[in-house]
Image: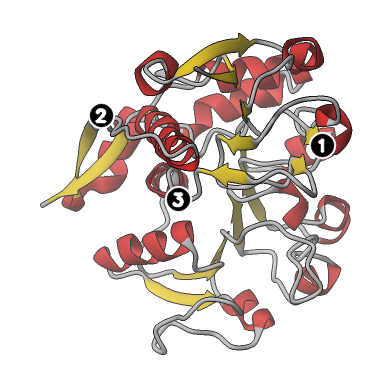
Amino acid sequence: MIKLLIDNSIPAIDTNFAPHFQITRYCNSLDIPQLLEDNEVIVCRTNTQINDDLLANSNIKLIGAASSGTEHIKTSSIPIVDAKGCNSAAVCDYIFAILANLKISNTKTIGIIGFGNVGSLLAQRLMMFDFKIQVFDPFVFKPKALAVENFLEITKTDVIIICPNYHTDTLFPTHHLINNDFFERLSANKLIINTSRGNIVDEAALISNWSGFFCTDVFQNEPYVNSELVAKARICTPHIAGHSIEAKLRITATLSKKIHSFFKLDFNPDNLHHTIPIRKASWQEDILNYYNPEFESQQLKKNHSPTNFKALRQRHIRHEFEFID
C-alpha cells in the first residue's frame, strides 16, 4: 500500500484514503521530520510549512495542500495538488454574514478584487440581491458590465472585498496590493473586507494612514497577529471564512480524488452536503440568527494570543447557506 502522512485535523481521513493508503497522522508539524520515513505522500494545511530541506531525505512523491493556496509550500521538484475552489461557498457565506452584521444594503456599490472561484461566486450571489457590482481582475475574463480596467477605480465603490490569490509574480503581484497609494484614494466612510490572505494588505499602511472600516479574517503573520490591527478592525476573525463543515469535507474528497488519480487508482469519494436555508426576503436576519462573526471577533479582540487564535479556529463550526425564495 502507498504510505501517506496527513494532518490529523483534516476530516474524514479514513473514509477517503483507507482503502488504498497506509495512513500515518501527525498532530504537530514539528513531528513531521520524525514521521516522514518512507511515506510517499504528505497532506498538510496552511499552518504547516513544507520546503525542499524538510523533504530532502524523504521518498515523498506528491504533496497535497488542504487549502486553496499553496504559498506555504516551497519546493522545486515535487508536484503539488490543492483544493482550490472547495471553500468558495463558505467564504461567500462569511462575507454575507459580515454584510448582514454591518447592515449593508443593496443601495451600496460593492467592488470585488479578484474574479476567481470566490470573486465570481460572490458576484453571482450579490446580483441575486440587486447589489451594484464592480470587478477588477487583470487575469480573468469579466462581464463588460461589471469590469473595471483601472485598479484604483475600485476605491470609488462603497464596499471593497479582497478575493484574489496571493502571489509575488512580477505581473501584477498581490503582495501589499492594498497599500499607501490605495489608502490615499480611499475616504474614511468606506469598508474593506479581506478574506483572502493577510499579506495582500499592507497592515502598517492601513494602521497609519486610513481611518475607515476594516473587517478581516486573515493576517500577515498568523497566528501572531498585529495588536494594533486587531484593535482597529471592526470585525476580525481567526482565518475561518472558508471553514464550513461542507468545505472541509469537500477539500478532503477533492484531494483524495486527485491523489488517487496521481497514483492511477480508482476511487470515488462521497461528498456530503448539508445547508442552512436563508430566506432572500430576510437574509440579514436569518444569517445572523445562525452565524454572527461578531462573537468570534469579540473573543479574538479579548485575547489574540497565538494559542487562542488557534483554539478559536479549531472550535469554529458552521454549515453553508442555501438562499431560498
Q: Position of residue 205 (x, y in %)?
A: 86, 58
Q: CA distance from mark 2 to mark 3?
A: 16 Å
Q: Front-most of 54 and 228? A: 54
Disc nearest the viewer among 2 and 1: 1
Q: Give the amino acid at mark 2.
A: Leu
Q: Amino acid at mark 3?
A: Gly
SS under mark 2: loop
Please give left or right for residue 1 compared with residue 257 in the image.
right
Q: Residue at x 82, y 51 (%)?
A: 203
Q: Quadrant of residue 318?
A: top left
First-in-chain label (2 vs 1): 1
Q: Which residue matches tag 2?
A: 272
Where residue 237 sits, quadrant-wise, is: top right
- Decide: is 164 above or below 78: below
- Packing grade of label 1 (10 A; few <14, some 14-19, many >=20) is some
Element under disc 3: loop
The x and y percentages for residue 42 are: 63, 27
- Could you tell me which residue is drawn at 84 percent across and 28 percent down? 54
Which label's residue is closer to the chain start, 2 or 3? 3
Left/right of residue 158 with respect to residue 231 in the rendered view: left
**Residue 1 location in percent, x, y?**
49, 17
Along the line of sight, the residue nearer the viewer: 244 or 21: 21
Which numbered circle lies on residue 51? 1
Give whichever of 158, 73 is nearer the camera: 73
Mark 1 or mark 3: which is in front? 1
Say above or below: 74 vs 54: below
| Separation of residues labelled 2 and 1 (CA atoms) | 33 Å
